[in-house]
Image (cartoon, rainbow, N blue to C red):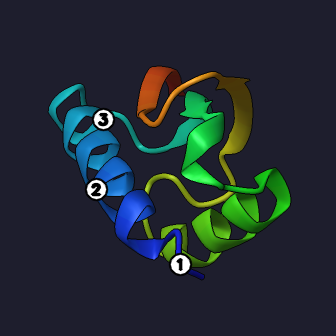
Amino acid sequence: MHETHLIKPIITGISEHAKKEGAKRVSGIKLKIGALTGIKEDSFKETFSVLAKGTALEDAAIEIIFFPGTRIEVVSFDIE
């Protein structure tokens, strides 16, 4: 779960924004992940799921687009 330090700020940021919007939950998240980060999609999603337990992001569908680079970007997220 070496992705933990990358995922926690994403969860925190999206949670704070969703709360400001009055959302009860986040149903979907679209991310762009740089291929040079070495992140594997399955491992990232599994770690995200564990860390999101008990938050508005629990059970959110995650779509990942890989691109050449080293960054992780939140492209969009859907709130309810």
Side (left or right) of 33 relative to 70: right
Q: What is the three-letter code of the residue carrying label 1?
A: His
Residue occupying the point 58% across, 34% down = 33
Disc 1 is placed on an element classified as loop
Q: Which one is closest to the eye, mark 1 or mark 2?
A: 1
Q: Mark 3 points at which residue?
A: 18
Residue 2 x/y as whole percent: 53, 78
At a point 70% along the width and 27% down the height, the residue shown is 66
Q: Do the residues labelled 1 and 2 touch (CB within 8 Å)?
A: no
Q: Disc 2 or disc 3, which is closer to the eye? A: 2
Is residue 65 shown above or below 61? above
Q: Mark 2 points at which residue?
A: 9
Q: Quadrant of the N terminus?
A: bottom right
Estimate the x, y position of residue 44 in percent, counting from the top left. Answer: 68, 60
Q: Nearer the viewer, residue 20 or 12?
A: 12
Residue beneath label 1, please?
2
Q: Position of residue 30 (x, y in %)?
A: 61, 26
Relative to 16, does residue 57 appear above or below in the rendering? below
Calculate the distance from the C-alpha at mark 2 to the C-alpha at mark 3. Answer: 14 Å
State the residue at coordinates (44%, 54%): 56
Q: Callout 2 environment at 10 Å: few (<14), some (14 to 19), or many (20+)?
A: few
